Amino acid sequence: MSVLTRTPTPLGRTRISRLQGKARYAPTLATVGLFLAMFAIGAGMYPGFLSGQVFLNLLIDNTFLIVLAVGMTFVILTGGIDLSVGSVVALSMMIAAALLQAGWNPFVVIALVLLTGATFGLLMGLVIQVFEIQPFIVTLAGLFLARGLCYVISVDSITVTDPFFTAMAQARIPLAEKLFVSPGVVIALVVVAVAFYVLHQTRFGRTVYAIGGGESSALLMGLAVPRTKVLVYGISGLCSAIGGILFSFYSLSGYSLAATGMELDAIAAVVVGGTLLTGGYGYVLGSLAGVLILGIVQTFISYEGTLSSWWTRIVIGALLLAFILLQKLFSRKVKLA
Amino acid sequence: MNEIVPVVDMSGISIEFPGVKALDAVDLRLFQGEVHALMGENGAGKSTLIKALTGVYPIDSGTITVLGATHRFSSPAEAQAARISTVYQEVNLCPNLSVEENILLGREPRRRGGIHWKEVRRKAREVLDQLQLGHIDPGSVLSTHSIAIQQLIAIARSVQVDAKVLILDEPTSSLDADEVQQLFTVIRTLRDRGVAILFVSHFLEQVYEISDRMTVLRNGRLVGEYRTRELPRMGLISKMIGKEMDALAELERAESRRQPGRQDEAPVLQAQDLGRKGSVRDVTIALHAGEILGLAGLLGSGRTETARLLFGADRADQGHLSIDGTAQTFRSPRTAINRGIAFSSENRKEEGLIGDLSVRDNLVLAMQASKGWLRRVPRSTQDQLAEKFIRTLDIRPANKDALIRNLSGGNQQKVLLARWLITNPRLLILDEPTRGIDIGAKTQIQKLISSLAADGMSIIFISAELEEVLRLSDHIAILKDRQMVGHIPNDGVTMEDVMTIIAGTPA
Amino acid sequence: MNALLKHRLTWPVLALVLLLLLNQLFRSDFLSVRVQDGHLYGSLIDILRNGAPTILIALGMTLVIASRGIDLSVGAVAAIAGAVSCTYIYNSPDPSSLRTAAGGVAIAVVAGLVLGLWNGFLVSVIGIQPIIATLVLMTAGRGLAQLVTDGQIISVSNDSYQAIGAGFFLGLPISILIAAAAFGVAGLLTRRTALGTLIEAVGINPVASRLAGLSARSIIWTVYVFSGLCAAIAGLMISSNVTAADANNAGLYIEMDAILAVVIGGTSLAGGRYSLVGTLVGALIIQTLTTTVYTLGIPPEVTLVFKALVVIIVCLLQSSKARDLLRQRRRPVAKQSDVKVAV
Ligand SMILES: Nc1ncnc2c1ncn2[C@@H]1O[C@H](COP(=O)(O)OP(=O)(O)OP(=O)(O)O)[C@@H](O)[C@H]1O
Ligand SMILES: [Mg+2]
């Protein structure tokens, strides 16, 4: 046997580990930093950009995306993915619009929509967990199914005239002089706060991270892996339903083709926010910043005004890329420093 | 010892995997306040038995009784609820989370308003201190620590709970002597408190030091249950391998020294002050054909890092490296391999195995990689090579189509070793090649290393077992605090000599 | 028998046969193939012909997925390929000649290769996660295609060009022949050489592969280039079939169909082991599904619902877990070692 004795203190080791511990936050910090930088660039380029309301409008215009990104963060943290969110948003809007049109009480409608969304997610989660089918496929089927159900409800768009919904659409909550937000913003931020709490202060939340770090390890550590994995999709479904309601507040209609491709926006926002698609690393606050970044890109484009629709697509793609590259560069620097 | 009712009583346990009967009517009894060793060769079924007990694998037949109640755990969580705490063979923690979380995951102390993080830290500190790991920052991320530290943290997790049964599957495979002693102190304390402990190790000294009784398995079958002090080592070994082993005496004898390497020719590998920021520095080595260089040093002293630099797995940013006298900069392992260097990593799960491929595919991978994808190694050659190495290294099951992830740990290691031997490298770097390998296989590998060197291959040998390093090497390079502090020829060097150098050089 | 039940292609093939029989039940001439003017006609031929672009793209996708990646940009690449070739033909002095058609095809193929190189560069050199790296081109790609066509639908009339999607050779539709050739090439390329195993190795454990001396970078690059190439040829087929380039709608959602085909064919999205034959069967299932919707007269509103259900059922049939549950046989709750490497 060896007679090696313990090193008094492996100095180098602890120093390195502390540094790398901080590097965990690097991608998220990079996102926040770059968001600020982009805001500053916008301020330099366009007069009137640097105003509180421009920032608040970013929130107002993206409430539903924020909520979707929160749900998506849970799923991606476990190493999964949920492609169904855009369709579930549309389905929620259709259900809400159809029921409201039929004269249902708006609160009952909202409750029902949330229940439907959560159930839809849970069912997908169950299929994923029990039958071990890949999330990408199950939720892709979920995408088709929810979109299909939209058409079954109605092929045409349905306008929402319910007084509560219209009130929510028009309501403005003043913050300061000439600064206001919509009720949707409050709801979205509450969702973010709750998600943050759940992820960092509950055993469930820590299990989400643990699964992302290594599912079989988490299982061997005796964590409630199956339950958590199912719940995560339930949460994403619930968030999609909330997103659908918020989108209804925003657009006052239900339309089968609404929110097409929004799942990709949500995924992009989460990734831009520093969450790794392989799971285990990332924060909801990062995802919030990610949504704001995508929003600011849209704002740039609307400020530019003259872009043809194809240039818009190209610019969005290019900015997405530029952003990811910058973030990569930035977080690598932090790691080396 | 308390002979009344066993805490754990497994009887007639059988488990069959596709193609292998991993366990065949095996019994195991654990009593309160004993340390029980589970012994057997690689692939004997030790880990499988443990996984059967703790609900990872469902059993095909047999009964499991824990504290008088019959159980069929269907998940590790249920086993834990029955107060069985387990450290599995491979480190099974979450690399993305902090040390403290890994210790307390799933049982974090809570208060109103969520997890009580201060308390988490306090409890983590407490158990780390208990294992003399006070220097580890509980807030640091797990993946920043070496395998050995991770192993210790897994142990910390298992002893942190108030368990009735503690199961340790090869907990000492990457620990150094001092850490082993530290662990044993903890084990003894727990034993005296009445915990039943199941211990697996391939180190006989450890087994004889710590265990009271032992159960021996062979090829998935029960050989018997013995009192440790009534079963001499030779008896144990022959029970494990199933035949009397004279060769074993030979094992314990020191290796006869080989011819010295060919010093007259230019060194195969020469490194001058090689280093990398944040990794190691001052690596100076000259290695001739047919020489074995041992790397000695404490845990975390930079042994693995040195190997990675020489192999191009990490890029050096200081110093020079030359092969056969021509200067080289290795940008990737590929360039190193093309110069005839091979490296077998200590982290076989993450850096070695291609889990879902067969033994054959894994065996020929490095050779295929160096040939390029266009020139496929013909199937017949693949089969020949696979059969040859399965035979020479006694890889079990002897099935070249088995998925490598289904092999036992020791057999996986042999496959990885063979992967490099096939490429017939000029310099073979072996990082902990004998870890987790049973005693027979270990001698085999040591002999193999000697004979490879005799045939002219240069070898860099890394092991936490200094004895092994001293027995095999022609030269010894000594590392300390991520710096090379000495390089001595092995002419009767003793462990004390090495320790003096490590202790003596100021960092 | 048991081995047959366990084979990973058994269930997909069974599903395909069932779907075909279902069609036959509703239309008795469904399975018959006629010869007319020396050309083969019939629903089966239609399925193959209409499915050719999906088959092609799914082939490329299989290798990308085996390497632990994914390529969302294939639909956009197909649109770009159609756009550049049609625009070239449209603007050339001799828009109906064979030479012009060849030129258009060449340009499209080059475009596909370049775009594949681009994706491969982002994934293997820069190290961006594949979903995001290819999302960039998915988003921007249709914009690029529109830029090429100036937002118009470019119609061309060139017999040679039209032959790619609608022509016949030796009695068989040319698009089927192209898909078959691509399938053969991919099969030979990956199984006759070591490429297939190396792709699998990289997909299963990239870190270990690198340490074993694999040039993971060039392998990953190769699969994306191949995927780009397949997408470009598929784009040519699509535009040739309608003799026009529609930047907005050509190949829309084909990436999802291709991914479905790959998975139904038994290749795991987690990378590693793959099956080209499985992908072929998967693509045929997807295409037959579309045909079935018409045959059965399913109202268009529920088409998507129908598709979702069939996909789920096929995946369930294939999932060994589901079959175990049916047979009440329990399996290990955890794999012995899940190799997991953060990217
Ligand atoms: N999940 C599995 N699927 C198929 N075969 C398996 C599986 N797990 C283990 N085996 C086989 O069962 C046998 C026993 O393996 P086990 O891991 O229990 O050995 P062990 O005694 O722990 O060996 P070691 O000392 O090398 O760790 C081996 O032949 C192994 O290949
Ligand atoms: Mg074992």
Image (spheres, coloured by chain):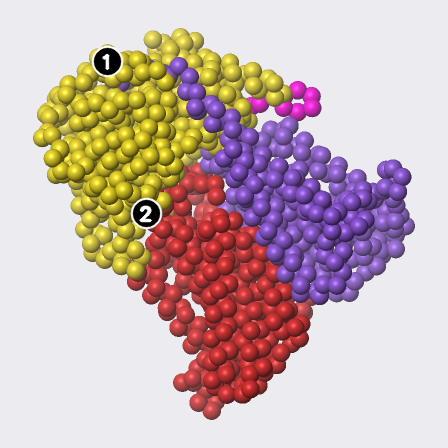
- Judge from the rendering whether residue B41 lies leftward or rightward of residue C119; answer left or right: left
Dot 2: within a 10 Å radius of its alpha carbon, few (fewer than 14), some, or many (20 or more) residues? many
Q: Secondary structure at mark 2?
A: helix
Mark 1 belongs to which amino acid? Glu
Q: Which residue is mark 2?
A: B334
Considering every residue shown, the one lying at the far bottom of the view is: C37
Q: Is residue C75 above or below residue B37?
A: below
Q: Dot 1 lies on which element?
A: helix
Assess whether residue B110 is covered by the magenta stretch: yes
Residue, x 40% and y 28% (percent of image)?
Answer: B146
Please give the letter of the chain rendered in yellow: B
- Residue A150's place in the image compared with B281, above or below, is below
Chain identity for the colour purple used in the image: A
Tell me the distance, in whole angstroms, between the alpha carbons under discs 2 and 1: 39 Å
Start and end of the magenta stretch?
B107-115
Q: Nearer the viewer, residue C170 or A46?
A: A46
* Relative vertical location of residue A89 with respect to residue C234 in this rendering, above or below: above
- Which residue is disc 1 drawn over? B496
Label the red chain with its letter.
Answer: C
Taking depth in this image into account, of A147 and B281 the one nearest to the observer is B281
Dividing the picture into quadrants, the one containing residue C7 is bottom left
Where residue A114 appears, as percent x and y from the top left, is 74, 45
